[in-house]
Amino acid sequence: MKIIIVYLLIILMIITLCLKAVGKKEVFIVERCGKFYKELSYGLYFLFPLIDKIVKKIPLTEEILKFRYNNKLYKVGYSIIDNKKYTYATKKPLKKIKKYIIDKYQHNNNIDVYNFNEAIEYIGIKLIDIEIT
């Protein structure tokens, strides 16, 4: 009888480790055997351990990137519009955007968000606002 209880506890523990809950305001990118498998939106999912891996958890809300450069504070409002591009286009997409903003701002003191969005479309991010103080 004790052995059956132990087996049931082990099975229950394995099942709970395989279940993943995704919140309303996020998306999970899942790879199976190292390749893109699917995007998980709101709900409860069963993933196979050692086969499926959550690569990135992406917020669906607008985010703010803050950084300082040359004694100026940059506040960049952005949202992620393409989850797959955001995950796989570059290793550090926010660092890439930060560098691009700094490069553009050094050449002219005004950044046009529309033109900037066209330039970074391949990353899967859309800028909403850039504030420099």
Image (cartoon, grey):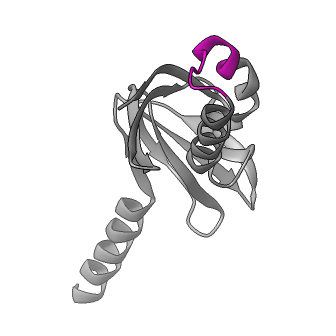
In the image, residue 69 above or below residue 16 = above
On the image, the x and y values in percent for residue 124 come to: 66, 30
Report the quarter where the N terminus lies: bottom left
The residue lying furthest to the bottom in this view is: 3
The question of residue 13 being in magenta is answered with no
Q: Quadrant of residue 6?
A: bottom left
**What stretch of residues is rendered in magenta?**
108-117
On the image, the x and y values in percent for residue 31 come to: 67, 52
| 77 with respect to 29 (left or right) | left
Report the quarter where the C terminus lies: top left
| 64 with respect to 54 (left or right) | left
On the image, the x and y values in percent for residue 127 come to: 54, 22
The residue lying furthest to the top in this view is: 114
Near-viewer residue (97 or 133): 133
In the image, residue 26 above or below residue 116 = below
Near-viewer residue (69 or 123): 69
In the image, residue 122 above or below residue 6 = above
Marks counted in the figure total: 0
Please give the name of the residue rendered at 54% of the width and 53% of the height, measured from the top-left corner: 47
In the image, residue 32 above or below residue 132 = below
Please give the name of the residue rendered at 54% of the width and 50% of the height, measured from the top-left corner: 56
| 8 with respect to 68 (left or right) | left
| 6 with respect to 106 (left or right) | left
Near-viewer residue (64 or 27): 64
